[in-house]
Image (cartoon, rainbow, N blue to C red):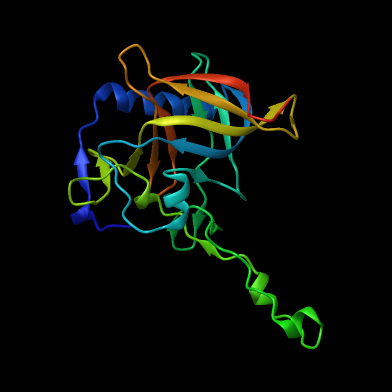
Amino acid sequence: MASAAQIEKRPITGTAIDLLQYQNDLVRTQKYIPRGRIQKIAIGPSSNWRPRTECPFIKKFGRLIDFRGPFLPIGEAPDGSALITAPLWKHEWGVGLPEVPDPSWAPGAYTPEEVTFKVARDPAKDRVRTVKQLLEDRCEQDDSGHPVLLEKTDFLVFQPVLTISYQPEFEGRVLPTVWRVACLPDRSGTWPALLVDYKTGEAHLYAGRYEFGIKAVGER
């Protein structure tokens, strides 16, 4: 994570701050409909983002966030907006994302001795290589490539959010299927944004419109 001196702060309106507090109140009082567990969040390109590393995962999938193990719960607010109802996974070194398989990885070739079982194959040759998912590689950035925060907050900004894949929950049961939330611009033309406090993991979906319950491709 960049140091405080490297992070540009952008203004956030009182209305936006009020909305984040409203969302926190809904979660605290449980005045929302549980919708399931987030698996992936697809974030589109923007003029304020550029790949900062030669990460093979970003090179292939762009700004995709893959939650894998500790899936985030998602809910629907009374006004139809989307709520993230728990903080991001916090490691011993801070808030972060799980590692993901390296899409450029391929297992090592078999030697003639391994094929004929003259020698045992090294298990490491078949162990999938992983890469780190870094929040600062996916968030909005300033002209120098440093992360941008909302003014007077520690929230990183990820915008535009395009789709959210989630495992739906119904009557307290998580279903063995994948649905998605279509994320669309609101009446003002503002696309949804994911906000993540890089110190605490508190997360919000801000602005935009959300359509729940769309089955993912291949699902019936």
Relative side of 168 to 158, left or right = right
**Number of numbered discs present?**
0
The quarter of the rendered structure image containing the N terminus is bottom left
Examine the image and state in which quarter residue 173 appears.
top right
Residue placed at 18% from the left, 51% from the top? 144
The percent position of residue 63, horizontal first and vertical second, equals: 42, 43
Q: How far across and how far down the image is residue 21, in percent?
A: 39, 28
Residue 110 falls left or right of residue 5: right
Q: Looking at this view, name the residue that lies furthest to the right.
A: 117
**Residue 84, position as x, y percentages in the image:** 51, 33
Report the residue at 45% width, 57% height from top: 56
**Residue for point 23% across, 39% down:** 152
Q: Position of residue 87 (x, y in %)?
A: 50, 43
Extreme bottom residue here?
Answer: 118
Given residues 47 and 213, the one toward you in this image is 47
Judged left or right of residue 118, residue 179 is left
66 to 122, vertically: above or below:
above
Viewer-side residue, 152 vs 38? 38
**Placement of 116 over or under 69, stated as above or below:** below
> Is 38 drawn above or below residue 52 in the view shown?
above
**Residue 217: which quarter of the image?**
top right
The quadrant the C terminus occupies is top right
Q: Is residue 166 above or below residue 95?
A: above
- Residue in view at x 35 percent, y 11 percent: 187
